[in-house]
Image (spheres, coloured by chain):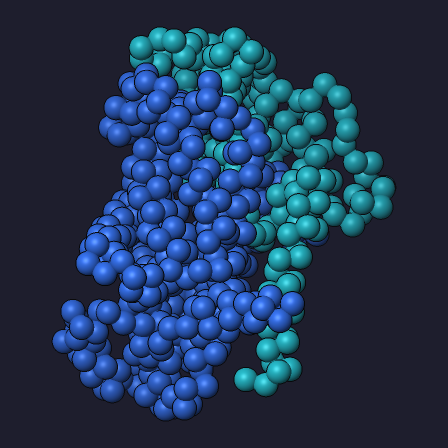
Chain colours: A cyan, B blue
């Protein structure tokens, strides 16, 4: 191997190491990029001030036209996608819309440069679910509850709170919000 | 100053020297796993564009997902590349091609607001094609004889690069834990994450239920501390191959624990650690099998490899991969984690035995 080749290889090593700095800035500013040299952080202990373990959860209540009620878990609703994605998809698509509106203006430079991110922010902030998602939801419910006509779906968000001093972990539920989707 | 420059050179160009035959066996094992793993991300077109939520990356410039054809096409070519990789035909092209095709599928699957950390599966072929994993037990090696030992240098620096990448990636997992309460003696992070995994993600099983019944703080704190320590240890030991291999072996037990309790099998990581194993030892224990493999390589032609790849791709995409089990949890991944823990145990027992019999030479034997 020539000294020039060795020098290039050392440059490659230096680039890999130095890249960690801009990558860290990107993660802090915009969230985790893809691809990135990152492993899952599993940061935090989810422990609240009283020493209880607390995390957000969601369940889906379906009201049918004949008055019956059905319950669906995120796991069943999104069974087409890997379970690792369920939490993120539910939070982005079916959580109550944020109180503060920090979506990008459609005619701003960054919205024009990154239309994917701009659209996803708009969808996340919308009060009414868009027709595409509604149609998908209707199709999924038809698969999960064949022969029943849904007219209202409520995504009930709550905190699971575990008392760590109990022998076996049992959750107490604290409601945090609801998102309703009405079908015609 | 001179000593520093020497040590950097030694780390990059000598520390991770290995042989082509060992890497060839590693390539076969990697490709065999990939043929269980593919096809991937065919579920993406089941969701409408309204679900599109891209991370910082290439898909930011798009507004929705590609159609079914895109995923079938990329998976089809990736399966052909994996078959070429298995037999070591056009290894470099197949390695780079496979990495890019998998990346092309993952971009969209990770545009739902969630990124799975299987980046080692993309980086391994990109790096190992430079290491010369196509120079042993391959059709390429049969067609082109080894080039007089020149590959030795290339092998060493590529593996050193993979080692430093693994070290950095694992440190990126250790730092957020260490700075967010995992080291606090009064909070039990793994217990909280397991509860989340059981009650939110829905991954509950016999092991998780039994483990969550344990209420002893010492028990949970041991796992919190050892997780942070093992993840940080990769980067701290990267300059000494022997120590790095011990960390890789210990990490196999860590990943088996995660696979059994949280049903998350980090097979990409296991495969990255496997690159540092001395697979040429199998020539001693499974020489017959490898001779048979060489005879198979002698008897097949490039056309046969390509047509086999196309046939496998057709079967996988038309009927599904028969080696992929329909369960949500990943039995093959768990089995690989268990196997890796077994190999790690044999390695560590051998190491301890060597150290007891000959403590002075044991530092060399670990290499």
Tell me where residue B338 appears, x and y as whole percent.
Answer: 25, 47
Identify the residue at the far left of this view: B288
Left or right of residue A154: residue B132 = left
- The one nearer the camera, B27 or B89, is B27
Tell me where residue A181 appears, x and y as whole percent.
Answer: 58, 20
Identify the residue at the far front of this view: B360
- The one nearer the camera, A59 or B288, is B288
Q: Can residue B293 be seen in this view?
A: yes
The residue at 45%/47% (across/down) is B233
The residue at 80%/45% (across/down) is A110
Tell me where residue B84 appears, x and y as whole percent.
Answer: 37, 74
Image quadrant where residue A149 sits: top left
Tell me where residue A63 appears, x and y as whole percent.
Answer: 47, 14
Q: Quadrant of the C terminus of chain B?
A: bottom left
- The one nearer the camera, A152 or A22, is A22
Q: Can residue B32 be seen in this view?
A: no
The residue at 46%/18% (across/down) is B186
Counting the numbered discs, the total is 0
Q: Quadrant of the N terminus of chain B?
A: bottom right
The residue at 38%/63% (across/down) is B275
Left or right of residue B90: residue B346 = left
Left or right of residue B54: residue B149 = left
A88 versus B357 height, above or below: above
């Amino acid at each position: 191997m020539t000294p020039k080749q060795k020098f290039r290889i050392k440059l490659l090593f230096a680039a890999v190491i130095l890249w960690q700095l801009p990558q860290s800035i990107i993660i802090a500013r915009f969230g985790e990029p893809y691809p990135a040299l990152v492993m899952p952080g599993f940061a935090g202990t989810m422990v609240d001030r009283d020493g209880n373990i607390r995390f957000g959860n969601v369940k889906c209540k379906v009201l049918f036209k004949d008055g019956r009620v059905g319950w669906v878990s995120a796991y069943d609703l999104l069974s087409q996608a890997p379970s690792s994605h369920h939490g993120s998809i539910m939070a982005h698509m079916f959580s109550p819309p944020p109180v503060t509106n920090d979506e990008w203006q459609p005619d701003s430079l960054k919205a024009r440069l990154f239309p994917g991110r701009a659209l996803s922010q708009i969808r996340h902030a919308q009060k009414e679910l868009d027709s595409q998602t509604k149609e998908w939801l209707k199709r999924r419910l038809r698969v999960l509850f064949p022969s029943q006509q849904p007219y209202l779906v409520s995504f009930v968000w709550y905190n699971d709170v575990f008392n760590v001093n109990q022998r076996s972990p049992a959750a107490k539920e604290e409601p945090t919000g609801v998102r309703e989707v009405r079908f015609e | 100053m001179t000593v520093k420059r020497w040590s950097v050179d030694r780390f990059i160009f000598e520390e991770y020297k290995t042989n082509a035959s060992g890497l060839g066996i590693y390539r076969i094992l990697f490709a065999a796993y990939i043929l269980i793993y593919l096809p991937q991300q065919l579920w993406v077109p089941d969701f409408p564009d309204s679900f599109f939520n891209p991370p910082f990356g290439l898909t930011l410039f798009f507004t929705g997902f590609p159609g079914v054809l895109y995923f079938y096409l990329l998976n089809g070519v990736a399966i052909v590349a994996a078959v070429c990789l298995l037999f070591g035909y056009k290894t470099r092209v197949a390695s780079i091609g496979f990495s890019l095709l998998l990346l092309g599928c993952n971009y969209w699957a990770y545009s739902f607001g969630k990124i799975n950390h299987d980046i080692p599966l993309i980086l391994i072929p990109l790096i190992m094609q430079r290491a010369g994993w196509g120079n042993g037990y391959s059709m390429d090696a049969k067609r082109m004889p080894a080039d007089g030992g020149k590959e030795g240098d290339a092998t060493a620096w590529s593996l050193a690069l993979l080692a430093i990448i693994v070290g950095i990636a694992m440190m990126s997992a250790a730092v957020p834990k260490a700075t967010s309460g995992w080291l606090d003696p009064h909070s039990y992070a793994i217990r909280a994450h397991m509860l989340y995994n059981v009650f939110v993600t829905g991954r509950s099983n016999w092991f998780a239920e039994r483990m969550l019944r344990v209420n002893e703080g010492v028990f949970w704190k041991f796992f919190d501390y050892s997780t942070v320590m093992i993840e940080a240890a990769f980067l701290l030991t990267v300059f000494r191959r022997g120590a790095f291999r011990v960390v890789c072996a210990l990490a196999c037990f860590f990943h088996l624990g995660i696979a059994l309790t949280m049903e998350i099998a980090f097979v990409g990581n296991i495969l990255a650690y496997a690159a540092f194993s001395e697979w040429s030892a199998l020539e001693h224990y499974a020489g017959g099998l490898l001779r048979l493999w060489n005879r198979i390589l002698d008897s097949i032609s490039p056309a046969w490899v390509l047509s086999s790849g196309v046939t496998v791709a057709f079967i996988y995409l038309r009927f599904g991969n028969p080696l992929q089990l329909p369960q949500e949890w990943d039995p093959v991944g768990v089995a690989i984690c268990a196997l890796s823990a077994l190999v790690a145990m044999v390695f560590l027992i051998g190491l301890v035995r060597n150290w007891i019999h000959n403590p002075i030479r044991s530092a060399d034997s670990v290499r």
